[in-house]
Amino acid sequence: VVALFMGLTVSAEEIIRDRKILKRESFLNLSWNSYLQSKLLILFTLSAIQTLTYVIIGVLILEIKGMTFSMWAILFSTSCFANVLGLNVSSAFKSAVTVYILIPLLLIPQMILSGLLFSFDKLNDVLSTKGKVPIVADLMTSRWAYEALAVDMFKNNGYQEYFYDIEASEKMADFKSSFKTKKIREKLRLIENNLDSNKPEDIEKVDDAVSIIYNAIESDEFRGNLAEEDLDQLLKRENIKTETIKKIDNYVDLLRDNYLKEFNLAVKKKETLQYRLENNEAYDFNLNEAKDKYFNESLSDLVRNVTVADRVIEFKGQLIQQIDPVFHKPVEPDNPLNYRTHFFAPEKYFAGTYIDTFYFNIIVIWFMSLLLYITLYFELFGKILVFFGNIKLKKKK
């Protein structure tokens, strides 16, 4: 938000101040594009200095180690976006007073929808989808910058970078062996108790439970004792028999045991790595000192969402993981251009490949800046204001 504010304030008056010069130069057919590029060159340079000064002072006061460049890259990108946005505003309005009244109104939605003030799941269901960042928030630069900053500072600090991949396996195995299997069992008992009922509400509950179990099993790589025909039986409530329920019960036992093994293996790998790091002279690594120097427990609690009441929730036939989003790698979507995933995801899937959240989000911010530059070049904001200003309402006789 500070980067957005600085970027807006330094650019908001630039075109207004040059209005008379621009009017005179318009008769000479001088390049509007060259004028804008010269403005952006100066503003981007100023933003680079401002954000670097801000980051250096911040990391010195807060004693944040080893993250200076990545923090600056995110804040600089955000400030550059604000520069282009400020030029759009400056181009659209003729009064500096109007512009400075407008700046807080531009910043308020950036603050509210950044993802920091409240969980996106708290938004109205019309605006949000459980387990994914709402599209309305995706329009906010602050959401991309904040997520990139938080995930990068957790994943790539001088302590966590050694253990992140192992801990990701550990936490995901723990989730599947504990919470996922528990939910599947709950739904199995619900089906068992209501399978023969003819009440509409019981039939609906069974159908929902069948859908959740099918999707939970189908999305998991582990198949255990189940064949495809066993899964197909779950597609229709009429095909479910006592034998099917018992078979899925056995599958859940195998699923839990499989991920318990993965969990224990990850714990052993982590302990082995800790021992090697502390006893290898080449690393010169003290575990406690490194954790005290680089690791931030409040940030860890934030990106792991440890305060959430429900570790897993149900939504439209799916089990949505709430705990440990920073360790939860998103699955490949049906549409390769569908980038949407949960907040604090460690990676984004786009165009057939996984991209680290830090780089993906910075690319998105610069893409948004490019779109704003196009609107600036064609002066679309001003033309839209003129269009609405020319609309006249008919008076009733």
Image: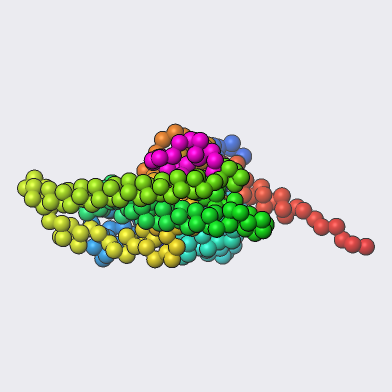
Near-viewer residue (226 or 297): 226
Residue 36 visible here: no
Location of residue 245 with respect to 393 vertically, above or below: above
Which quadrant does the N terminus fall into?
A: bottom left
Residue 96 image offset from top left, x and y in percent:
56, 61
Q: Nearer the viewer, residue 287 or 251?
A: 251
Instruction: Give me the residue at 25% from left, 59% from top.
Output: 295
**Is there any visible trace of residue 283 in the rendered image?**
yes
Quadrant housing the C terminus: bottom right
Q: Position of residue 393 (x, y in %)?
A: 82, 57
Q: Position of residue 272 (x, y in %)?
A: 16, 49
Instruction: Give the residue drawn at x 67%, y 58%.
Output: 199
* Colouring method of the image: rainbow
Q: Closest to the observer: 320 or 6?
A: 320
- Magenta range is 216-234
Q: Residue furthest right?
A: 397
Please state which of residues 50 and 13 is positioned toward the viewer in this rendering.
Answer: 50
Residue at 39% from the left image edge and 61% from the top image edge:
305
Judge whether 309 appears above or below 30 on screen. Answer: below
**Which residue shows up at 55% across the image and 49% down it?**
210
In the visual, does 204 lie left or right of 151? Answer: right
Give the x, y percent position of residue 25.
Answer: 57, 42
Q: Is residue 262 magenta?
A: no
